[in-house]
Amino acid sequence: MAIYLDVIWFLNFCIDFLLLWLTSVILKREVSKKRLAVGAFLGSLYVLFLFLDTAIIYHPIIKFFYSVFIIITTFGYKRFGYFVQGLFMFYFSTFITGGGILGLHYFLQTDAKIVNGVVKTQSSGMGDPISWLFVILMVPIMLYFTKKRVDHIEVRKLRYDQVMNFELKIDSLTLKGVGLLDSGNQLHDPISKQPVMIVDMTVFADQIPSAVINHAKSLDSIGELVDEPNPWQDRMRIIPYRAVGSANQFLTGFKADSIGIWDNGEKYETSNVIVGLSFTNISGEGEYNAILHPKMLSNAKVTSTAS
């Protein structure tokens, strides 16, 4: 069997380059293509060492220190934590890509036969052109898939990091729920300039007085309310807003006595809040039932800390 060493080396160089690139993308590190190429070149040299008549290069310790050398060459050494993060993420990228390719290979493999009740498989070895073609095609696909999954996880983590428990107090009523701290929420009461949070009335409708709900639902396009007395008449507010692709609209709200928000074990409390009422579901997956205004936290005071 003929082995084209230059082809194998170049293939490994390309794979190492992509793995180091994926590592830099996941860690959000600015690395020049030149350093990525140098690191990939050092990594690809290991393939040449495999043809040397020595067994020490197969030892896990040698492999570990060789990968350490590759990471330091590619990303540099700023501090120990920085280096360890790069090393472990490089292993993660390598294992998840290699494991995915290996899993797909065996998933699609059809060369198994049953002979006299015994399952037998056949393989033509490392030099099989079909196997190499499979690797060449699958490495970029697995790298792309891994990057997309990591990006998705980061988005989900960002969303959950911004989700906080809250407790609203209005007269003798207390509303408890989970709110999303949204930096894009810039709603303010035009008169008092107080920030406006939005609560999901599909969740809290049964706790709000029916007269308040009727007022909110009767709001027409010019911001007028049906004249119907309700216990929160003095608290009612009309907040104009404009959504993308639509004309000016109005949101009905009311002034709350106070709101408590829990963030990282600390309770922030403020009375500087208007509660807007939304009659459409604001979280399709039910992760939260209110949208918090960022200024509610900046204007709040820490009243208690979890032990």
Image (cartoon, grey):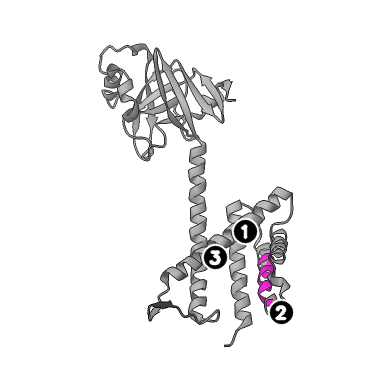
Q: Amino acid at mark 2?
A: Leu
Q: Earlier in the sequence, mark 2 or mark 3?
A: 2
For label 1, the residue is 90
The residue type indicated by label 3 comes to Gly
The residue that appears at 25% across and 14% down in the rendered structure is: 227
Question: How many neighbours does mark 1 have within 10 angstroms: few (below 14), some (14-19), or many (20 or more)?
Answer: many
Residue 220 x/y as whole percent: 27, 25
Identify the mark at residue 52; answer none if there is no mark: 2
Q: Position of residue 114 (x, y in %)?
A: 38, 78
262 relative to 138, above or below:
above
Is 153 on the left or on the right of 21, as rendered?
A: left
Q: Which residue is mark 3?
A: 98
> Is 42 covered by the magenta stretch?
yes
Q: Earlier in the sequence, mark 1 or mark 3?
A: 1
Foreground residue among 295 and 24: 24
On screen, residue 175 above or below 42? above
Residue 233 position (above or below residue 128):
above
Q: State how far apart marks 1 and 3 are (Cα).
A: 12 Å
Q: Which residues are magenta?
A: 38-48
Quadrant position of residue 21: bottom right
